[in-house]
Image (cartoon, rainbow, N blue to C red):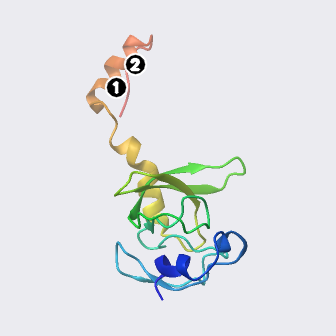
Amino acid sequence: MNREHKKRLFEKGYYKTHPCNDTFICKFCGKTVVPTGAGSDHRNHCPYCLSSQHLDNEPGDRSADCGGIMEPVSVWVRKNGEWAIIHRCRICGALNSNRIAADDNPMKLMSIAMKPLATPPFPLEKIEEMTRAMGGDGDLKW
């Protein structure tokens, strides 16, 4: 059964209090995702491509009508040091945060984390000039 149709079968908020241990096929990469290995009772994204599907407006409510692919756009670190993935819906632009799972692809997580450093909003050649403008000597050794 497709997980996007579960909102028709269970009462509102069912997944807030019950585990979501369903196997599903990722809408982005097409791989089969099984609940085992996640380290949680709530598997909510693909461990291979880290994409998700826009099902909830609030965690577990299954009330989103959008159903779009939630692409991983960033990671952040919570107060306790735990990493979480920021997802953005390709259709409506909604943002949400999901804890990483134990079996998430570490190279994909690192590539998302490093993306802002690899593609800064200015040319890398400008770093020395900007350093001098901020009072540094601008003599950077690469």
Residue 136: quadrant of the picture? top left
In this view, 60 is above or below 96: below
Q: In this view, does 62 lie to the left or right of 72?
A: right
Tell me where residue 88 appears, x and y as whole percent.
Answer: 42, 54
Residue position for label 2: 131
Mark 1, secondary structure of its residue: helix
Residue 108: quadrant of the picture? bottom left
Amino acid type at circle 1 is: Ile
Marks counted in the figure total: 2
Mark 2, secondary structure of its residue: helix
Split into 4 quadrants, where in the image is the C terminus?
top left
Q: Is residue 5 left or right of residue 36?
A: left
Tell me where residue 57 appears, x and y as whole percent.
Answer: 54, 59
Between 63 and 104, the one lying in front of the other is 63
Residue at (29, 24) in percent of width and height: 126
In this view, 142 is above or below 71: above
Mark 1 packing: few (<14 Cα in 10 Å), some, or many (20+)?
A: few
Give how far apart the Cα atoms at labels 2 and 1 are.
6 Å
Tell me where residue 109 appears, x and y as whole percent.
Answer: 48, 60
Q: In this view, does 63 lie to the left or right of 90?
A: right
Between 96 and 31, the one lying in front of the other is 96
Tell me where residue 3 appears, x and y as whole percent.
Answer: 50, 80
Residue at (38, 11) in percent of width and height: 133
Task: Determine contact: label 2, label 1, CB under 8 Å.
Answer: yes
Residue position for label 1: 127
Residue at (70, 77) in percent of width and height: 18
In this view, 58 is above or below 137: below
